[in-house]
Image (cartoon, grey):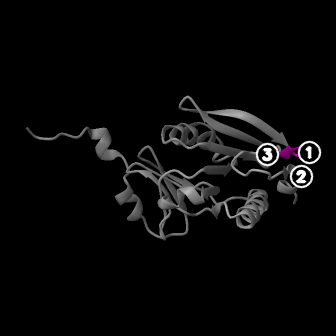
Amino acid sequence: MLATKSISEDLKFTIEDYFALPEDGKQYEILDGELRMSPSPNAKHQTVLLNLATILKQYAEQHGTGKIFVAPFDIILSNYNVVQPDILFISKDNYAILTSDNIQGVPDLMIEILSPASMNHDRNIKRKIYARFGLPEYWLVHPEKKYLQILRLQAGTLRQVAEFKANEVLTSPVFPGLEIKMSDVFKE
């Protein structure tokens, strides 16, 4: 008996296609076999990303809990899913997924800084993909409206469990004892 592939599967981008893309300075991802290119982030996005990543990196280093990475850094979830969240955390217990070239598996936390171009993908498409692969915690940061949402995996779905505004203090079990002043995250 001959093995058959559906036409739609033939048209999906795979990890092999991804690694064959030119190194043109653009940031690509594959979401369920669909190639997506993200435009360069604006200054506010970059400021928030750097502020938050710095806070988390200092905590992780001081407490020896794991490693913080920022995009671009490939996370290979499957043959049809390669993502580059803005910030990610891998705990020491999860280092087996870390290679010198990429991450092969699910980090402990992924963070997306929302922009008009990425908002739908980050809130809906990536959220569903991340839940399907078992991401325990997902943060969505809105630099314009100055809030951060925490979503946690519950019954196979990433559900919002908290929202922190610019004048509040964020806590998360991913970083025990860390209190993040949101005003420090959104500081320009």
Disc 2 is placed on an element classified as helix
> Which residue carries the number 2 mark?
183
Taking the magenta stretch, the answer to whether it contains residue 102 is no
Q: How far, Cα to Cα, is label 3 from label 2?
A: 14 Å
Residue at the spot x=66%, y=50% of the render? 112
- Identify the main secondary structure in magenta: loop
User: Quick one: which residue is furthest to the left in this view?
Assistant: 1
List x then y, in percent, for residue 62: 75, 66
Which SS class for mark 1?
A: loop
State the residue at coordinates (81%, 46%).
170
The residue that appears at 35% across and 59% down in the rendered structure is: 16
Query: Magenta span covers which residues?
Result: 166-170
In the rendered structure, the answer to whether residue 188 lies left or right of residue 72 reads right
Crowding at label 1, few (<14), some or many (≥20) Cα neighbours within 10 Å? few
Do labels 1 and 2 touch, CB within 8 Å? yes
| 32 sits left or right of 152 in the view | left
Dot placed on the residue nearer the N-terminal end, 1 or 2: 1
Q: Amino acid at mark 3?
A: Thr
Q: Nearer the viewer, residue 8 or 173?
A: 173
Residue occupied by mark 1: 167
Say the numbered circle drawn on residue 112. Answer: none
| Image position, residue 126 (x, y; %) | 56, 42
- What residue is drawn where x is 15% and y is 41%? 3
Taking the image as shown, residue 15 lies to the left or right of residue 154, namely left
How many residues crowd around disc 2 within 10 Å: few (fewer than 14), some, or many (20 or more)?
A: some
Q: Is residue 133 above or below residue 93?
A: above
Label number found at residue 171: 3
Q: Residue furthest right?
A: 167
Q: In which quadrant of the rendered image does the C terminus lie?
A: bottom right
Q: Position of residue 67 (x, y in %)?
A: 63, 63
